Each structure stands twice: as structure tokens, then as C-alpha cells.
Amino acid sequence: MPNFDAIIIGAGQSGPALARRLVAAGRKVAIIERKLFGGTCVNTGCTPTKTLIASAYAVHVARRAADYGIRIEGSINLDMKAVKTRKDAVVAVFRNGVEHSLKTLQGCRVYQGHGHFIAEKRLAVNGSELAADQIFINVGARAAIPPIPGLDQVPYLTNSSMMDVDFLPSHLVILGGSYIGLEFAQAYRRFGSEVTVIEIGPRLISREDHDVSQAIAGFLKEEGIDVRVDSKIIGVEKLGNTIAVNIESTGGISQIAGTHMLVATGRRPNTDDLGLDRAGIATDRRGYIQVDDQLRTNISGIWAMGDCNGRGAFTHTSWNDFEIVAGNLLDNDQRRVSDRITAYALYTDPPLGRAGMTEAEVRKTGKPALISTMAMKDVMRAYEKGETKGFMKVLVDRDSKQILGASFLGLEGDEVIHCVLDIMYAKAPYTVIQRAMHIHPTVSEFIPTMMDKLKPLQ
Ligand SMILES: Cc1cc2nc3c(=O)[nH]c(=O)nc-3n(C[C@H](O)[C@H](O)[C@H](O)COP(=O)(O)OP(=O)(O)OC[C@H]3O[C@@H](n4cnc5c(N)ncnc54)[C@H](O)[C@@H]3O)c2cc1C
């Protein structure tokens, strides 16, 4: 049985980086990947969706060309095969990069197959048994399929199978009005599909503040997306060439029939076929591996990183998990999960950049706070670019003057949010950014102005 110093299961966002660090520290490492190198982010998540969204943005701007004084002679046609080819090419660069770097890494042996525990520090893959004193689990998550009556009888798409779509669905019905569903919704609407989003909750992306989710629903509807909230799906069925979704809402029972259906109702960890019980590794009731603040599982010498530990659901949280584990193990740097500040983006157009607490969360703390908002139509750069949808909102602790959170929904919101995020990490008062001289004309130049306009949160 080959013995290693460390075995990593899964070549997602944290596994490959940790393999490189461990090898550099002189450890003998094995990494097991059962499918595609780079995992969800590279193959079926961030990279392909943002590449598709770039195509959707291009066609959207082309259609708005006249707004900018440009006349396009003839019609604007979309070639979905070419859109997919472009997406595949971008993905291939990243995936091949990860695969090549691991396969050429001296001191690291790559196993391609499904890895699972057969005992505490022993794994099986492709009939071979491997052992190591240290094991790192980076197995990620996949689309959760809800128990909707009839769902198993109809063809449906997930974020993974959407990646093979090289045609334009005539009517895409999306189950789930949260981050993943909304990015696909806008992209496919811009490609030319009729799109319906069905959300069980009273509003889209309900984790965000009311004003944020309302503004997003507003611009999606303006683009012609049929948004159905407060809508419980009670069943799906095949109806001729369509898939019919039966919905119960306050108005009674209704039916929406689409040509294609995307299920985007959440994620579940890839831990059900990992043999965790053979190693005695504890999970919560949803299957997420339980870890402490340094990502150690209940079994000494076994760590869990990335989406499978339930401590984050983003590429940057998985990467940060790698940094925490490497810091603690190799650098005598006691980094912790609790050091990090919530931060993420939604890549609709305009995007939403988020840092720290929402306004609702700040209110719940009951602490005296200050708030400032600014409409994107008052931001000169947005005006100049003809992209004035959305608004920016920042919340500050009245006493400590530290920034508690921000939601930037608007042009470059995903980038501008970092102005605030880094001040939060520095634990500096908002007055630092208030006094900073920012560059004109940018969206960021209005962050100091927003700080000038802070007023008590009523
Ligand atoms: C549509 C979509 C869009 C997204 N967009 C963004 C975004 O814009 N920004 C962002 O930050 N996040 C985004 N995410 C989330 C992001 O993709 C994930 O949070 C991130 O990829 C998690 O990385 P990970 O390291 O936990 O695991 P993953 O990247 O999922 O990798 C896990 C790997 O483990 C392998 N594996 C699983 N089980 C086994 C086993 N038993 N044996 C061997 N190998 C195994 C898998 O094949 C996979 O390659 C998006 C997700 C989706 C679905």
C-alpha cells in the first residue's frame, strides 16, 4: 500500500494549492480527483458562468448600440454554438492549467478516480489503497435536487448540464430565485430565451436587504424576465414538447410550461459517497463536514476545506480555507475562519458587491449605527457610461466608527466593494476612507462622499 505524508481528496479550489505548499515543504503528497481538475469553479461554476455572462453583456450592449450613437446595419444574431465554444476555450485554459501543474509537480502523485475512506487514515481509489497521517478533504458540492413530485420523470438541467447547452432554449423555466438562478436567468434572457424564475420565498435572493432584492427584481423584470415569487412548486410534468410546472401561490394554482427547466434550488455537499463513517468523521444533518475554526474535523489529522465544510460556498472561501490550513500547518500562523469578513458578489448586470452585514443584520444587533446610500444615477461615471441602475449602501457603527457592512448594486459593484472591505479588514474608522482622495471619474470616488452623508439609522 503506497504511503504518503498527505492525501488530498478533490482538486477544487483549495486542494491543488495545498498540494503545492505541502510538496514545497518536502512532504510526499497524493491528490485524488474523480472528474474535472479545477472542480466546480473552473468547470461548472464561476468561470463558465462569468464567460457566458460576458457574451450576454456583449449582445445586450450591441442591442443598445443606438443609445451610444452607433448604428448597426442589419440584425444582431447570436450564435449559441460559438458562445459555448468561447466558454469551453476559457474553461479549458484554467482546467488544463490545474491538471498540468499537478501532474508535473515533483513529489505529488495524482490519482484519477473516486476516492473514499476505508478506515480512519486509509483511502481507496480505483482498487488501490493509500494511507497517510494527514488527510485533507476538498470534495465540494453539487446541485441539490428538491423532492418535487414528477421531477424525476422530466428532463431537467442543473448548473453542470447547462454547460453542454449549445442552443437557445425557447423558454427556460428556472426553479429558484437565488444567486445561481438569477445569473443564468439574465444571461439567457439576453441571449434571447423567454425566461421564467419561480421562487418559493416572498422575494428574490432573500438573504439580501429588501431594497436590494427589489431593485434586482426590478431590472430583471424590465428586461422581460417573468419573476414569480411566493410560488410553491407542487409538481412538474411533461406536457407535449414542454415541461409544465404547477405552482401554488396566493392567486391559486397555476401552470407554467417551458421548453427547458433549470433546477437552481441550492447545493449539497459531495460527502454522501465518501465513506466518512468508516473514518468516524462527523457531519451535520445536511452532510457538511463539521470543522473547528482552523478547519480540523473531529478526527485528528483530517481537515475539510471548501464548500464541503459548510463554512463558505465560494471560491474565495475555499481558497481562504487553503490559506488557513497552510498557515497553521506550515507557517506557524494561527489563521482562523472567524478572521474573515463575509464578502461575495452576484454577477447580474449591474452586479451586486457585498461586504459584512446587511442592513437587516445591523438592525438586529440593536447597536446605534449610521447609514448612507447613493443612487447610481448620481454617480458621474455610471451616467457617462449609460449604466445607472442600482444604488450603493454603507453602514457604520456610530461609536467605533468602523464599517459594519455594504451593499453596492451597480456598475463595478463587485470591484468597488473592495474599497470598503479592505478598510474593514484594517479595522480602521470610516473617516480614513472619507478623507481619501479617489480618482475621478470612477464609481469609487463616491465612497468618500457617501461617508460624508452618513446619518443615523432610524
Ligand atoms: C453556477 C455557479 C456559479 C458560481 N459562481 C461563483 C462565483 O462567481 N464566485 C464564487 O466565489 N463562487 C461561485 N460559485 C461557487 C464556487 O464554484 C464554489 O464555492 C467553489 O468551486 C468551491 O470549491 P471547492 O474547493 O470547495 O470544491 P470544488 O471546486 O467543487 O471541487 C471539488 C472537487 O472534488 C472532486 N471530488 C468530489 N468527490 C470526490 C471523491 N470522492 N474523490 C475524488 N474527487 C472528488 C470533484 O470532482 C471536484 O473536482 C459558483 C457555483 C456555481 C454552481
Image: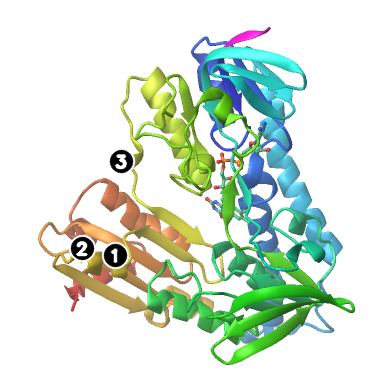
Amino acid type at image mark 3 = Asp
Q: Is residue 35 found left or right of 380 in the rendered image?
A: right
Which residue sits at x=29%, y=65%? 361
Which residue is pictured at 17% across the width and 60% down the height? 431
User: Residue 122 at what x, y percent from top left?
Assistant: 60, 16
Q: Nearer the viewer, residue 67 or 203?
A: 203
Element type at mark 1? helix
**Any mark on residue 365, and which?**
2
Are the residues tagged 2 and 1 within 8 Å (C-beta)? yes
Q: Which amino acid, mark 2?
A: Thr
Residue neighbourhood size for the residue with mark 1, other residues' Cα within 10 Å, grouped as few (<14), some (14–19), many (≥20): some
- In which image quadrant can residue 97 be found? top right
Residue 362 seen in the figure:
yes
Residue occupied by mark 3: 339
Secondary structure beneath dot 2 equals helix
Q: Main secondary structure of the magenta part?
A: strand
Query: In front: mark 2 or mark 3?
Result: 2
**Residue 361, disc:** 1
> How far from the left and from the top, in percent, is residue 430?
20, 59
Ligand 1 positioned in quadrant: top right
Task: Tell me how far mark 1 sits from mark 3, CA to CA.
Answer: 19 Å
Q: Classify 283 as above or below 382.
A: above
For the record, the magenta segment spans 1-5
From the viewer's perspective, is 379 left or right of 359? right
Q: How many marks can you see?
A: 3
